[in-house]
Amino acid sequence: MPKLKVPKSSPAIDMTPMVDLAFLLVTFFMLAASFRPSEPVTVNTPTSTSETIIPENIIMVTVASDGKVYFNLSGAEARKEALTSMMGKYGIGLNKEQIEKFSFMSTFGCSMNELPNYLNLSGDAQKQFVTKGIPIDSLNNQLKDWISFSKKAALNSGKTAYEEAKKSNKNPNIDDFKPKYIIRADGKALYTKAEEVIDVFRDLNISNLNFVTSTEFNPFK
Amino acid sequence: MAEIADSGGGGHDKKGKKRAKKASTRVDMTPMVDLAFLLLTFFVLTSTFSKPKVMSLAYPAKIDKPTGDAPKLNNGITFLLSEDKVFYYTGEFYPVDKPGPKGPTKLIETNFGPQGLRKVLADLNSYVLLRKEGLVKKVKAKQMADSTYAKEMDVLKAKPEALKVLVKTDKKALCKNFVDLIDEVKIAEIGVIAPVPILPAELILLENELKK
């Protein structure tokens, strides 16, 4: 009988399955994560127990703690369309590059006159840009125009998305594709400032508004 | 973990036997794993908390021509908000010069905590909350579908016995106060919430109360 040899086990472990799993998860989270574009202001939203997640097709007005008003619209195509309408109304000329850049930007807070200069700045310089926010005075109510043009643009892009979903999906709900109106107010902002924005929405017959909040524990769930 | 890789470029030490150098097929994966887990941790931490929530609120439509007096409010409560302070009165508003059956309206101060607002609202809206409990029991016992429950709740919230809430703010109220109040109102299962402008008489009353 031959002598049984005890094989010397190597102290190294085969890490391949672990690496496979790790990379699988990395890939998943990378694809699932949506990057938040840099914002010109930091907004500390108040907390609520609401569990509705922010929808996709949105028109969002931000009220910063100092009362300045910022605007944001989702969807590159809708942004281009809204911007083109605004350029026509205010007689501001922008070149193709600037329009392209605008369509990939996020929240901005400058008047139409300041917009060309603002668009020429790089991301970091945009944060330093001194502005009074989007004008909402009764004589120069640019926010109202932004909202009404964006509403049209967002309805169009929502319609396209709905048609596409209809082709692949069985019965999508058309209400999910309509733009939602969001107010993101800083907790420390005066309510009267938010009310000015709300009044602009109400002037346009938009009365169903959503406040952005962060999550709070609900003791009744 | 550590694995000592064979020193490459050998072949000089044993000149006698010519043998093809057996290079180890194993690659040291430690740095790659480190990197993978670093990325994994980063994405897990950043992606989970990025989606904010929204709280929906329907505002009353704007009316071009206000028609005289405000409509009679049955079973209502009015909240007056100021900076980090909240007052309320129930029922109709009676100014000092036109007192109601119980004299002019007096404001009652409360707070945003569970002993304040939540208690007030739960007491006044007990009609809805008690019936909600019954419905929840039915859902739990599988006697009622979720969709029926949602419909029943909507009907319940719209009943005349259910509490209605008016929210009025002064110039110093913060958005945080407003959202906190609406949140409490929603916790109390109140269907009718109307943010409305403050009356001059109410503002005077509120300012007097704040001076105290």
Image: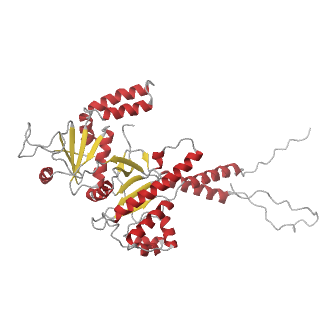
Q: In the image, is residue B138 above or below residue B85?
A: above
Number of numbered discs on residues: 0
* Residue A63 placement (x, y as % from top left): 34, 60
* Residue at far left of view: B97
Q: Using the rendered view, name the quadrant where residue B101 is placed.
A: top left
| Residue at the image position 34 percent from the left and 58 percent from the top | A186
Q: Is residue B30 left or right of residue B175?
A: right
- Whether residue B186 can be seen here: yes
- Whether residue B212 can be seen here: no
Colour pattern of the rendering: secondary structure
* Residue A156 placement (x, y as % from top left): 48, 55
Q: Is residue B123 left or right of residue B203?
A: right
* Residue B139 placement (x, y as % from top left): 42, 28
Out of A87 and B118, give the one closest to the viewer.
A87
Q: Is residue B125 left or right of residue A166?
A: left
| Residue at the image position 81 percent from the left and 46 percent from the top | A7
* Residue B11 placement (x, y as % from top left): 87, 66
Q: In the image, is residue A117 above or below residue A178?
A: below
| Residue at the image position 37 percent from the left and 69 percent from the top | A110
Out of A213 and A16, give the one closest to the viewer.
A213
Image quarter in which the N terminus of chain B is found: bottom right
Q: In the image, is residue A221 above or below residue A14?
A: above
Out of A159 and A135, give the one closest to the viewer.
A159
Out of A176 and B166, give the one closest to the viewer.
A176
